[in-house]
Image (spheres, helix red, strand yellow):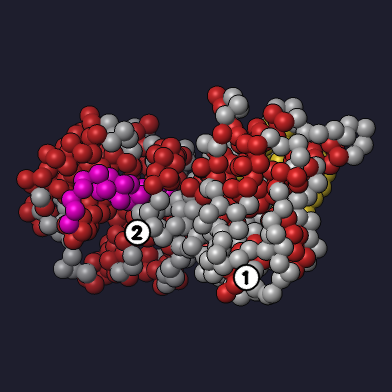
Amino acid sequence: MEKYEKLEKVGEGTYGKVYKAKDKATGQLVALKKTRLEMDEEGIPPTALREISLLQMLSHSLYIVRLLCVEHIDKNGKPILYLVFEYLDTDLKKFIDSHRKGPNARALPTALIQSFLFQLCKGVAHCHSHGVLHRDLKPQNLLVDKEKGILKIADLGLGRAFTVPMKSYTHEIVTLWYRAPEVLLGSTHYSTAVDMWSVGCIFAEMVRRQALFPGDSEFQQLLHIFRLLGTPTDKQWPGVSSLRDWHVYPQWEPQNLASAVPALGPDGVDLLTKMLKFDPSDRISAKAALDHPYFDSLDKSQF
Amino acid sequence: MEFDLQNPLTGFEEYHFDAVSALFANESDHMPSFLDFKSTDVRFSLRRHSVFLISQVQSSYKFDGYIAYLAVNYIDRFLSKQAVLENKPWIVRILVIVSLSLAAKMRNVDLPLSDIQRDVGLNFDARSIHRMESLILDTLKWRLRSITPFSFLHFFNSFLKLGDSSLTRSLKQRASDIIFSTQYEIKLFVYKPSIIAASALLCAAEELIPLQYSSCLAAISESQYSNKEELMNALAVMREMPIEGREYYSKLTPKSVLECEHTSSQCETQDKENIKKRRLSDIRDDQTFQISQVQWC
């Protein structure tokens, strides 16, 4: 690791500490992620091999934070793995925060929201076409290059089996605010649609500069969703009332979604509505979202 | 979620056509580049000994052929990126053991590695083996989800529109047999995995359904991804290969292969190796190797 000069700790990732560092030879800034993977007498654990190799494969996309290399070091006889990623200066959460408060508080430019959402859908479509779910999409996991207007997906799940179709997953995966209703209701067979729900929540958050459904427990999270979108029925979402964690909820009528995102035009509201469909099989896919009229005014040649 | 060579990118149980363009875009990252160096390069003999040892171990332990195939792919990619290596028997052994271990981990299969290690006469401690594992992983940039010809079989097979599913299966099976054999044919190294897959399918079609061969050729050539000239060149090489089920195949016995191994071997502990080889080949003396004599001697 003498190749890199650690500059500062920038956070705790899903699977260990993250440092901002500089490649001494090239001056390139990188993000070093120290993994908690333990090596035993069999060498690198098979799950780590399979997942890092998948990450390596996905990292070909422009819209996924690039895994530059993997470094092993031997620290007092204890092997440690560092994943070396490209470094981006900020994330979407910090970016939205900077527009909500402080001297520069103002709405995010409409064209930028459109461009960020397009890049996000590109990245998600890339993951999904490789059979990989992110399952933890949230503004903190979307890295942003402010100067260039680039957005990339980070923190693709290491240490979590993430292939589809899924048999049974642990439920501690998606941060509550971006968690899809089928996950909250205990569905054990969920799929790519869980990421699209999160994309919808992130879209709305860019427009509103605050979270769409800021729940602080699973139950509260569902109530936030139902209050805006109406309490789902078996008619609109077949099988919902047989899901494991379904209870009897207050019967709310759907509100006008446009009122939650007043700054968004009709095409944007239409796309958001399709991302926030209750029935996962009705929810728009990332690939289909890219062709939605909302993006018609975007200059796609830059992507 | 073990790694499936026929479906390397996705965790989908069903084949996913969206992933096809990703396969084509990435396949070159998983190819060895042996053609860049001279035929006298020590890496050729390292490769020859490694492939030989793997086929011996595989026939003794009867594990999944994909593991052996994948291990050879790792060895090829490793050797084609390592500049300085001496031809020492221990290098071959540790390379084989570690590549088999990596392939087995990717396939989620337990191999009796300590038995295999003993059988091939490798006496290294775990630490050295881990160092070799790290070296291979670094060299391969951790890209262990190799895109191989198997990854394209389903895609090209779907072009043939044979309708009959048992026919489709037999064709795929025969093409797989051919692909397994292509690792022994150095003339095929220049071709991308997708070209190998397409020509293996055509080769299989020519053997199994000769009357439909030309319509198969037309269908595959129409694919936006296949270059007809490369396809025909690769096919020409494949037609000449000794593959199980072809008449001249049986002329290659373990004995003839071993003899040609001896004459070309520069290993220090040749005698010790001979005993080992004999012992391993005794177990499987009814078998033959799919090794091209021309390339190997």
Is B147 one of the magenta-colored residues?
A: yes
Instruction: Give the residue drawn at x 27%, y 31%.
Output: B227
Q: Quadrant of the C terminus of chain A?
A: top right
Mark 1 Cα within 10 Å, few/some/many (few <14, many 20+)? some
- Which residue is at the front of the view, A37 or A155? A155
Residue to which mark 2 is pinned: B66
- Which residue is at the front of the view, B135 or B93? B135
Q: Position of residue A41 (x, y in %)?
A: 58, 68
Residue to which mark 1 is pinned: A186
Disc 1, SS: loop
Instruction: Give the residue drawn at x 62%, y 36%.
Output: A267
Q: Position of residue B207 (x, y in %)?
A: 11, 50
Q: Is residue A58 left or right of residue B109?
A: right
- Which residue is at the front of the view, B188 or B273? B188
Q: Of the residues shown, which amino acid type is indicated by label 1?
A: Gly
Q: Which residue is situated farthest in the right direction here? A: A103
Instruction: Give the residue drawn at x 85%, y 33%.
Output: A106
Cα separation between marks 2 and 1: 38 Å
- Which residue is at the front of the view, B102 or A143? A143
Q: Position of residue A78 (x, y in %)?
A: 69, 62
Is B287 one of the magenta-colored residues?
A: no
Tag 2 subunit: B
Q: Of the residues shown, which amino acid type is indicated by label 2?
A: Tyr
Q: Is residue B272 left or right of residue B251?
A: right
Q: Is residue A268 left or right of residue B229?
A: right
State the image quarter where residue B115 is shown: bottom left
Tag 1 subunit: A
Residue bounds of the magenta highlight: B146-164
